[in-house]
Image (cartoon, rainbow, N blue to C red):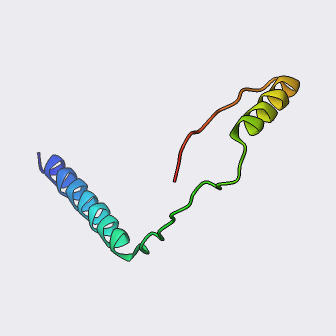
Amino acid sequence: MMRKTLGYFAFLLLIGNVVQSGAQARKTLPQPTERRNLYPENVDAKAEIAEALADATKTHRRVLLIFGGN
């Protein structure tokens, strides 16, 4: 019974240290920089998709399209 109680106590101390160190790490992270234009404006999306599909056909790979906008 005593060993079980000591095991629980050690576990709680370990969890407390992990939570506390995680909280300290969150406080020291730098603020994210603001990006307004993630995607270039002068891009021909249809041409890029066609190029990716042609390359994927040659190399027997798949294409993953990610859509987004500013």
Side of 69 where 18 appears, left or right: left
Give the residue displayed 65% in from the left and 56% down from the top. Answer: 40
Instruction: State which quadrant residue 19 falls in.
Output: bottom left
Name the residue at the right extreme: 58
Residue 70's place in the image compared with 62, above or below, is below
Residue toward you, 42 or 30 = 42
Q: Residue at x 53, y 44 (%)?
A: 68
List x then y, in percent, for residue 8: 18, 51
In terms of depth relative to the viewer, which is nearer, 15 or 4? Answer: 15
Identified at 77% across, 37% down, the residue is 47
Q: Is residue 50 left or right of residue 40?
A: right
Q: Position of residue 35 (x, y in %)?
A: 51, 65
Between 42 and 55, the one lying in front of the other is: 42
Does residue 51 lie above or below 19 as drawn? above
Image check: 67 left or right of 1?
right
Q: Residue at x 33, y 74 (%)?
A: 27
